[in-house]
Image (tube, rainbow, N blue to C red):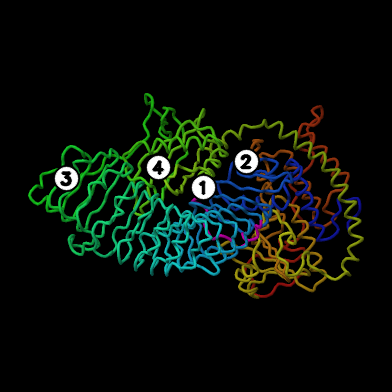
């Protein structure tokens, strides 16, 4: 044992203990005392380490105390909300999220760089209310464990690449209000019993644009459901429309179009008197044309491209007072006049209902004379009767808008008439006008409607079932602009909004571009962007009902991040950082002395502890987050992950062992080489030393200080995973500056010039040399700290002593295994035989 006059590190275990103490203590002194719960801080710092392009102030270790962008905390400094939409995040969502046990809202929408699967451990977030991951690049199956989120009211995973079936466990979410899984690659059947039939309080079923197959189960609908939107469009569903659909009298929007549905439309469909938009197009429906009498709220009907029975003009054509669009084309064959279905003469009264904007009845068997002479409806923009059997037309002066009769006998001898020609391309789509004299902007900026140059927040709005069809009517766009701006102004200063390039896409969604311009500045802050994204992702913005259900896909907004980083570089003078560092150094001497006294006491107890039975630091079989040691910045691996990366702990992968257990070389899925340290169960010494090491690691705020990658605590297994170092000791595995430059706040402007800070660490490293003779005496430690303080300017009247000692002394200890408490030679090459400890 070394002399008591030396900085005491009396064992190999104490060697690591001293090193971690010094560096951990120094890290603690460099930041404000943390306000954030340690478990939450560890989880967020782990995510910050894994993600790229995180917000500019995600550099400290205290998310709550330092007001990290997108993070909200409660009075107990627990993280309750993460909202990071449109910030350009890149990476994966790992199991670390499970440790945020107070989390109520998670919104990572519009970050296309977020990939990989949704971890099953997300089911541990028992207090989660909102889960919004719209417009990212997540893939894989939606985990079954999502059904454990019993408080969830808003679940929106649309516009990703999720595959597999809809988990039946979603039926457990009895508080769910909004369910949106649209625009993914989901397959399989619609789950019931258990499944969607249990969601009696849910108002939104959005499952369009997937690959769902099989029938629509009759059990999915019942009279006690509160659904207002049912969207199963653009799937591969077959079979008939279940008659139980008529029981859901709260329904307002129904989209079953673009499937392979067959059979007749249920006769009780007209019980749905609140339905405003009915889409049954592009199926294989048969039987009589459904009777829609009594559906007085209907404003949009599309039943085109089916195989309904031949019939005359139905009486309900002229009895729907709210109708704005009527589309019943039955043409599904190459030859236009074959197998037409609806016939008779069109009653003139059908055109005079004032809400009606569009009539599309092409490809049927309407005949006789068409009378448009008495049309007084100024809102009617289009009458499309192509490929019917209309023999003549009465024009008069009543109607002057677009009329198309191509393919009717009335045009056989009059091909030169306007209504007998294929219509030209439509007029340019709407674009918000500028209410001023335009000015020139920088090439990377845009001109707002109020003629200010700025960086707008941009994205695309998708309206899934608008009840209007006249895309040239500017009134609708003006309404939308006003509503959007009013909604944004509740949270963010906004100058104006701009809409442009509106069109109906191949999924029959109305699509248009959105630009939001900042007020009083050229760009939004990161906080502004996060709030704007949240307003649109969680449906805080609710447009007028004529626009129907919508979703938004935002683009990343790099301007906020770049400006925030440029401002941060000049935040504080360097001298403030130097003074803070010097003050921290002055406290280290006190800390070291206290540590030495504590260490001596602990050494006396070591023998007693070694006699006790080894035990794990957590309850066997427990999976609760409170039972797992919190290793900051480290990833939690499953035992199967560890087995896979070490080839099932193959002897060929073994690179060392000791009293604690064995060390194996491994390769992670991303190709990273790691060293896997596995504690030996039943070894009192091994368990004791392993638990002590975990205790030490849990103090460290930055994983690079000890090269820790992750850990596994799985029932009877305790495993630590480190970066693989080909040769050398822990000290030698650290960088020229020991990784400390990564701990320095960029606002201090020190870069890699750490000055006396580096010399202090050199002194700390000398104090943890393996041999006592190599360590300085306490008198030498005190003298050197005084010299470093002088160098830092704490005593301006003293001469600099920076050259009075040598700080480049080489280690005289043998090469040590960098992941072991034991001492043995380590070549770093693939072992040809088992290495034994010295």
Q: Nearer the viewer, residue 669 or 542?
A: 542
Please say if 86 is above or below 186: above
Q: CA distance from mark 4 to mark 2?
A: 31 Å
Residue 219 x %, y % = 49, 68
Q: CA distance from mark 1 to mark 4?
A: 16 Å
List the residue tagged with mark 3. 419
**Badge 3 density bin: few <14, some 14–19, many ≥20, Cα 10 Å:** some
* Dot placed on the residue nearer the N-terminal end, 2 or 1: 2
List the residue tagged with mark 1. 537
Disc nearest the viewer among 4 and 2 = 4
Which element is circle 2 on? loop
List the residue tagged with mark 2. 57
Please say if 312 is above or below 351: below
113 part of magenta stretch: yes
**Badge 1 density bin: few <14, some 14–19, many ≥20, Cα 10 Å:** many
Q: Residue at x 40, y 50 (%)?
A: 276
Q: CA distance from mark 3 to mark 1?
A: 44 Å
Q: Which mark is residue 755?
A: none
Q: Nearer the viewer, residue 235 or 600?
A: 235
List the residue tagged with mark 4. 513
Residue 1 x %, y % = 89, 59
Which element is circle 3 on? helix
Specify the quadrant that holds the C terminus. Answer: bottom right
Residue 695 x %, y % = 78, 58
* Dot placed on the residue nearer the N-terminal end, 4 or 2: 2
């Amino acid at each position: 044992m070394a002399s008591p006059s030396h900085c005491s590190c009396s064992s190999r275990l104490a060697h690591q203990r001293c090193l971690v103490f010094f560096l951990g203590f120094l890290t603690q002194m460099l930041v404000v005392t943390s306000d954030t719960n340690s478990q939450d801080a560890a989880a967020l710092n782990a995510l910050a380490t894994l993600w790229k392009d995180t917000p500019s102030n995600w550099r400290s270790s205290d998310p709550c105390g330092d007001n990290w962008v997108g993070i909200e905390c409660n009075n107990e400094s627990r993280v309750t909300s993460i909202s990071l939409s449109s910030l350009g995040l890149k990476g994966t969502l790992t199991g670390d999220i499970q440790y945020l046990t107070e989390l109520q809202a998670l919104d990572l929408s519009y970050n296309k760089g977020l990939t990989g699967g949704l971890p099953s451990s997300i089911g541990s977030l028992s207090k989660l209310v909102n889960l919004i991951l719209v417009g990212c690049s997540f893939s894989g199956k939606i985990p079954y464990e999502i059904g454990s989120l019993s408080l969830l009211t808003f679940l929106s995973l649309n516009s990703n690449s999720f595959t597999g079936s809809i988990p039946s466990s979603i039926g457990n979410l009895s508080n769910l209000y909004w369910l949106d899984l649209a625009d993914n690659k989901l397959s399989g059947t619609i789950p019931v019993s258990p499944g969607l039939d249990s969601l009696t309080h849910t108002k939104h079923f959005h499952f369009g644009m997937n690959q769902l197959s099989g029938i629509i189960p009759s059990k999915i609908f019942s009279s006690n459901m509160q659904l207002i939107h049912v969207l199963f469009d653009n799937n591969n569903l077959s079979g008939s429309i279940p008659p139980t659909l008529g029981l859901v009298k709260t329904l307002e929007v129904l989209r079953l179009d673009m499937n392979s549905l067959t059979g007749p439309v249920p006769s009780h469909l007209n019980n749905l008197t609140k339905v405003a938009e009915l889409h049954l197009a592009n199926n294989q429906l048969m039987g009589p044309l459904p009777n829609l009498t009594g559906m007085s709220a209907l404003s949009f009907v599309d039943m085109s491209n089916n195989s309904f029975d031949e019939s005359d003009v139905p009486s309900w054509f002229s009895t729907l007072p709210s109708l704005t669009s009527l589309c019943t084309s039955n043409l599904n064959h190459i030859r236009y006049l074959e197998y037409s279905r609806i016939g008779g003469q069109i009653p003139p009264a059908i055109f005079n209902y004032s809400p009606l904007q569009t009539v599309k009845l092409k490809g049927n068997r309407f005949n006789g004379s068409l009378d448009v002479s008495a049309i007084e409806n100024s809102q009617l923009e289009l009458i499309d009767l192509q490929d019917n059997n209309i023999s003549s037309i009465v024009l008069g002066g009543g109607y002057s808008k677009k009329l198309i009769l191509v393919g009717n006998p009335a045009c056989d001898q009059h091909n030169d008439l306007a209504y007998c020609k294929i219509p030209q391309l439509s007029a340019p789509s709407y674009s918000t006008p500028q209410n001023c004299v335009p000015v020139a902007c920088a090439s990377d900026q845009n001109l707002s409607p109020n003629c200010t140059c700025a960086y707008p927040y941009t994205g695309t709005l998708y309206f899934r079932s608008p009840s209007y069809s006249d895309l040239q009517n500017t009134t609708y766009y003006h309404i939308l602009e006003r509503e959007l701006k009013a909604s944004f102004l509740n949270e963010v200063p906004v100058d104006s909004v701009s809409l442009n390039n509106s069109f109906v896409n191949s999924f029959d969604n109305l699509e248009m571009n959105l630009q939001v311009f900042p007020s009083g500045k050229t760009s939004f802050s990161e906080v502004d962007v996060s709030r704007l994204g949240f307003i649109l992702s969680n449906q805080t913005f609710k447009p007028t009902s004529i626009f129907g259900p919508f979703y938004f896909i935002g683009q990343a907004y790099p301007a906020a991040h770049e400006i925030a980083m440029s401002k941060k570089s000049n935040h504080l003078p360097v001298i403030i950082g130097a003074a803070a560092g010097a003050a921290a150094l002055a406290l280290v001497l006190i800390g070291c002395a206290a540590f030495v006294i504590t260490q001596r006491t602990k050494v006396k107890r070591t023998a007693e502890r070694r006699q006790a039975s080894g035990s794990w630091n957590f309850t066997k079989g427990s999976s609760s987050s409170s039972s797992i040691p919190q290793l900051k910045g480290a990833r939690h691996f499953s035992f199967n992950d560890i087995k896979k990366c070490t080839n099932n702990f193959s002897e060929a992968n073994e690179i060392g062992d000791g009293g604690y257990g064995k060390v194996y070389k491994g390769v992670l899925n991303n190709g990273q080489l790691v060293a896997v340290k596995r504690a030996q169960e039943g070894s009192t010494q091994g368990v004791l030393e392993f638990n002590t090491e975990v205790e030490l690691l849990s103090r460290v705020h930055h994983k690079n200080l000890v090269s820790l990658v992750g850990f596994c605590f799985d029932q009877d297994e305790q495993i630590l995973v480190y970066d693989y170092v080909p040769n050398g000791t822990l000290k030698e595995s650290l960088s020229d500056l020991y990784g400390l430059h990564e701990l320095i706040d960029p606002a201090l402007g020190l870069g890699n010039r750490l000055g006396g800070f580096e010399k202090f660490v050199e002194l700390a490293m000398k104090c943890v040399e393996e041999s006592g003779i190599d360590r300085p005496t306490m008198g030498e430690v005190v003298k050197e700290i005084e010299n470093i303080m002088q160098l830092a300017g704490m005593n301006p009247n003293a001469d600099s002593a920076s050259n009075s000692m040598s700080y480049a002394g080489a280690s005289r200890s043998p090469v040590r295994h960098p992941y072991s408490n034991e001492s043995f030679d380590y070549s770093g090459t693939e072992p040809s035989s088992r290495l034994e400890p010295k």
